[in-house]
Amino acid sequence: MEKTVTLAHGAGGKQTSELIDTIFKAHFSNPELTADDAAVLDIGGGKIAFTTDGFIVSPFEFPGGNIGKLSICGTVNDLSCMGAKPQYLSCAFVIEEGFPMDKLEEIAAAMEKTAAEAGVKIVAGDTKVAGRGQVDKIFITTTGIGKISENVRTSGAYAKPGDAVIVTGDIGRHGCTILLARDEFGIDAKVTSDCAPLWANVEKMLGVTSDIHVIRDATRGGVGTVLYEIAGQSGTGILLDQEKIPVEPEVRGVCGMLGLEPLYLACEGRLVVVVPKDKADAVLDALRGCKYSENAAVIGEITEENAGKVVMKTAVGTKTLLPQPGGELLPRIC
Amino acid sequence: MCVGLSARVVSVEDGTAVIDAEGAKRSVSADLLEDLEPGDYVMVHAGVAIAKITDDDENESKEVLESI
Amino acid sequence: MTETIEKAKSTITGYNGKKLRIMEVCGTHTHEMFRLGIRGLLPESIDLISGPGCPVCVTPVGYIDEAVMLALEKNAVICTFGDLIRVPGTEMSLAGARSRGGDIRPVYSPLDAVEIAKNEPDRQIVFLAVGFETTTPSACIAVKKARKLGLDNFSILAANKTMPNAYKALMSSVDAYLYPGHVNAITGTAVCEEMKKLGVSGVVAGFTASELITAIAVIIEKSKTGEPFFVNCYPRVVTAEGNIPAQKLMAEVMEPCDSEWRGLGVIPMSGMKLRDEYSELDARIKFDLPKISGKANPACRCGDVLQGKCKPSDCKVFGKVCTPQHPVGACMVSTEGACSAYYQYGGAELK
């Protein structure tokens, strides 16, 4: 049977990486193209990070933000994850014929505000209008560059056994918010997206130590997916403490109703940070003093054993494997 | 099979109950339970309250283990 | 954990008596045993077999083919529990049908499908009614509601199943059943008492860590007597008589029929179908569906896995051709299936 692209290929899990490996990597492969959030390029006079991201969220506005804010945060955070101070962004809009002008204005205003907060300038753009039905209301692609400070080197590949794994706040709120905003399951809960630009948080951490091994933003696929990527890139194992993972009660309630795992719900303002154990407390203190990461917590450690796997310490004192993320998130009921 | 959710009843009207699980609320059918009242705990499955319950599994376990 | 639970836990970890084959007959039990790390507590002398209690897994290939046909050829909107969307049919899954233009919508409840039918009178809405006694009442409520609202654009494709004859079909493979708590919440415990008379022990179990530990510890303690036993370890939810309005409702709307279980074949009188009085709500009649018998992959040993005759890892296709991304057999398709749980949680020798 003819192979086609499915929603699972876009869900951020195993099928997404298969698609990237078999199609895109096969055609685009070069030393600068890595599995990290942004490419690190040496263009003379220091290193820069360079990245791009497309946004197709439906609905385009949701509690805690809209697609405009999201499109700035996504690219700003990808740059920040490489330890790069975000400097310039471009944005490309694909807008469906008939899209309300005042909504477009709101989206642009959110982008302006978020860019100002993150300290980046939007310096180039492109606008296309597609016929009705050819796109779903509005798609935005942002591309950004940022400058990497000297001595900073982060990558999923640098996680080392003994390192502490930190998450910068409660998880799964963005994914949960979108799920509820689509109103497909009739659930009502006070959850707002965690969508936020996080350069200030990264800058603060780098002020404490430049010895930060990994910074990743846990977007599509959630914290679970990012942890598997780190384990895979670095050839280590990750041991999580089930009870230490911060989850808001409402998010837990929604997940309970639909049989979903919060570790696989998207965040748009949460980082996974891997640091040497002796730096963990200082980094945690720095994070807790910043907006958006007041509830940062150590959730586990990098291990030599169980390479490539993410393992959970359970409440009954045993260990169990965190299932590999894969496919689209579907509610489990029967 | 049968993912169940233990939740508190917030209100009941015309065979429909609004239930609350840690702040997540939803309307579910109350057709299968008689005399449901706000404050009751129920087990919910696929949008239907299937049993009135108590919300304390550890105490239950203690009683079961002591009884055998 | 309380002191009592700690004690129960050490009853389990310290057990070294005769081999005990415990079968959990609920996919949610399978899933939670892994997720909560309960499996990690079990000594070698306890064999935990994952039985046929995942309704998605035991739904036959032909059923998916029927749903795909409804979506693509009859242009019906398919409303389904999310669990079914990835299950492979002979040609394709419902996810495959969706990528070819089929309108497939996951719902939380069959009542939501009735709501969709009310709001979209120009579309035919079909709800895929799978599940055991826990789930069947929700489909019956939906059927009655659709009739009350006079909706002529709602129907169900029924593949509901009942547990008792499956218990009997599998009883030679087990020493004690871990009965599915939420099924018993509806049916009560008479069937468990009947199994005890047939010489098969069991306990009704809940789903939290302390409930699962309690249930297994009770099986160990009671097995020492050598006599068949039954204990309700989930009394906060399960009563002896069960949910009587639900039982009456099921008997009013549906009747027993022979039913095919993926991997096990036809088990007599183990299914439920709509009574003749409700035939206008039966999608098979409404859309005049032909009899479809789907083809399962012959290399797959799901039938043996479900009967505890082999472990998932003993099957030749397990983890190679058959993975959660590309499931071949019944037990790999749902995250609650035995093979999927073994695969995802490693079955695993974790250090």
Image (cartoon, rainbow, N blue to C red):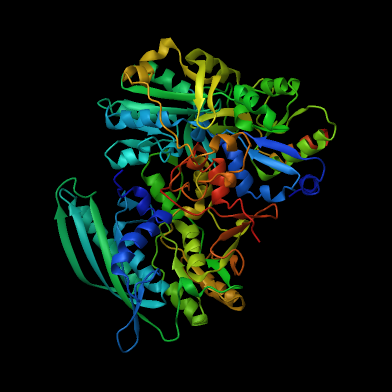
Question: Quick check: C197 above or below B7?
Answer: above
Q: Nearer the viewer, residue C104 or A95?
A: C104
Please report the residue visible at 84 percent of the width from the left and 35 percent of the height from the top. C224
Nearest the viewer among C52 and A50 is C52
Does residue C324 show up?
Answer: yes
In the image: residue C275, left or right of residue A237: left
**Measuring 36% from the left and 44% from the top, which residue is drawn there?**
A182
Judged left or right of residue A302, residue A193 is left
- Decide if residue C264 is on the left or right side of residue C33: left
Q: Residue furthest right?
A: C225
Q: Residue most toward the top?
A: C277
Identified at 38% across, 18% down, the residue is: C282
| Residue pictured at 32% horizontal, 65% vertical | A26
- Quarter of the image where one finds residue A110: bottom left
Q: In the picture, which quadrant includes the N terminus of chain A? A: top left
Q: Position of residue C254 (x, y in %)?
A: 49, 16
Q: Residue C239 at what x, y percent from top left? A: 68, 25
- Residue C181 to residue C256: above or below: below
User: x, y (%) of residue C170?
Assistant: 64, 28
**Is residue A107 toward the left or the right of residue A331 in the image?**
left
Q: Is residue A112 visible?
A: no
- The x and y percentages for residue A177 are 41, 50
Picture layout, residue A81 above or below residue C235: below
How many marks are shown on the rendered structure?
0
